[in-house]
Image (cartoon, rainbow, N blue to C red):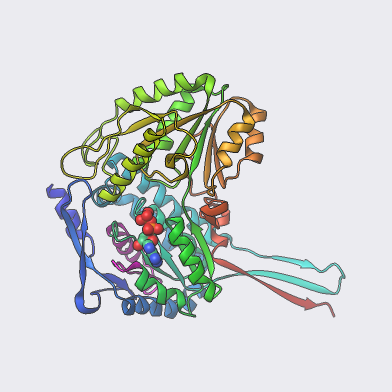
Amino acid sequence: EAAEWSLLEMVPNKLFINGRWEEAEERLTFDVKDPATGRVLSSIADASPADAIRALDAAVAAQDSWAATSPRVRSEILRRAFELVIRHTDELALLMTLEMGKPLAEAKGEVAYGAEFLRWFSEEAVRISGRYGVNPEGTGHMIVSEHPVGPCYFITPWNFPLAMATRKIAPALAAGCTVVIKPAELTPLTTLFLASILEQAGLPMGVVNVITTTRAAAISEPVIADPRLRKLSFTGSTPVGRRLLSQAADNVLRVSMELGGNAPFLVFEDADLDLAVEGAMLAKFRNIGQACTAANRFIVHQSVAKEFEHRVTERVQNMRVGRGTEKGVDIGPLIDQRAVSKAQALVADALGRGARVLTGGREVAGEGCFIEPTVVTDVPLGSSLLSEEIFGPILAISTFESEEEAVALANSTEFGLVSYVFTQDLARGHRMITQLETGMMGLNAGVVSNAAAPFGGVKQSGLGREGGVEGIHEFLTTKYTLVPVS
Ligand code: ADP
């Protein structure tokens, strides 16, 4: 308790604009709450549209000098930020557990993952290169060079408060772009803490600006409409992503969209079931099921379905529900009461269509937004559990008979972020790489995320990639120059 309060006192509660911590216009504030208890953690600045434009002014003013800062210097600032994030692992992890609810061990995992983007892009900052060639006619030299796109606006979600921020900020800084970031109103403290770390790492003023607000749409619209902005990067739900895309169209902005998922988890008859069960637990219950990469639909061959159901049910019955700060807890609270109601409505809908609950299914009585980890089987086609992103600890199983049927089921969604495939047949694994409509795939793996890999989706799961060699190109624009041979 004492450690929690002294940490919360360390976390900034103001807007970070042009290297200064500032009150919001009219000194408006809002409360950030712990979803496990409902208690207020901090009261922080609630930015107005004018505050957001001031943040953009700062990013615009800093753009030229940041772009002209040598790649080595940009790289070393990112490297120092990586080291500082790692040094503050305990504080950042506790802060995420407090404002978001995830178990402390998972929060520590997120610090390691989130920090990795700072390290990876510190290494990429010095490897930006174009190409040089002779045109086919032999009459000219072609120079292709890469340049920062310019000031960026980032909107991030609440489910991975640190990693979603570093995954956007690190490649932008490496590429030479400046940033305004608006974290989710439910979990803004981690981004404020990160800004103070970037400040300590020596980031020049105005290069990263943080605006916290309860008025996401009202402050975002004028920023996106401002002709000085060059890029919009968003992680969140598909409906909000669609709206932002149409706003971005007016200025023909560069966009990256990391939107919803509806990940299939295919277990073939030849799967190693030990691996599949292990993978299922990770893919489903990591982050209390609140990840766009969470396995949403378990599609299991009928010959192994009984065994798979039995084994995951046993595992789920042994999971501990509680505050993320308690030792041994696997399942923390959902982010809010709305999420609890939604999860319950999805289960009720499936039960009404003939599905069966094998374990769990109820809300946990008492304070906080808790729901029991749940296994539902025989989920029939047409159930909302199969078409909507569950975002909760509910493992929904249906069965298939043939590989063609499995592929058709897996692809029968407007989403295409990640797919999980469990098979020991190498040829089948390769067929799945070709046939599944997905941006990412775990082949006998329940977690795929890595700073060195291109994260992103196809279909309505989004546009663009974050991480990997690809990640920095989202923040670069290509210029071609012709020099005639005389
Ligand atoms: P979730 O359902 O996971 O909360 P959202 O897509 O609603 O996902 O939220 C993700 C982020 O988008 C948050 O930072 C939120 O404040 C922001 N957001 C939500 N609606 C809008 C909007 N209309 N314009 C701009 N940002 C928005």
Q: Quadrant of residue 222?
A: bottom left
Give how far across and how far down residue 114 sits, in percent. 40, 51
Q: Is residue 122 left or right of residue 110?
A: right
Q: Is residue 388 above or below residue 285?
A: below
| Residue 240: in magenta span | no
Quadrant field for ligand 1: bottom left
Q: Is residue 446 visible?
A: no
In this view, 384 is above or below 236? above
Q: Nearer the viewer, residue 398 or 336?
A: 398
Residue 118 showing in the rendered view: yes
Horizontal placement of 189 versus 152: left or right? left
Position in image of residue 192 (x %, y %): 29, 62
Q: Where is residue 415 drawn, in percent x and y?
A: 53, 48
Is 198 colored magenta in this rendering? yes
**Relative to 117, residue 273 above or below:** above
Magenta span covers which residues?
A: 189-216
Q: How many marks?
A: 0
**The C terminus, quarter of image:** bottom right
Give residue 143's position: percent from left, percent from top: 72, 71
Task: Say which residue appears at 66% left-offset and 65% top-offset.
Answer: 130
* Residue situated furthest left in the rendering: 2
Which of the two residues, 240 or 92, is positioned nearer the viewer here?
240
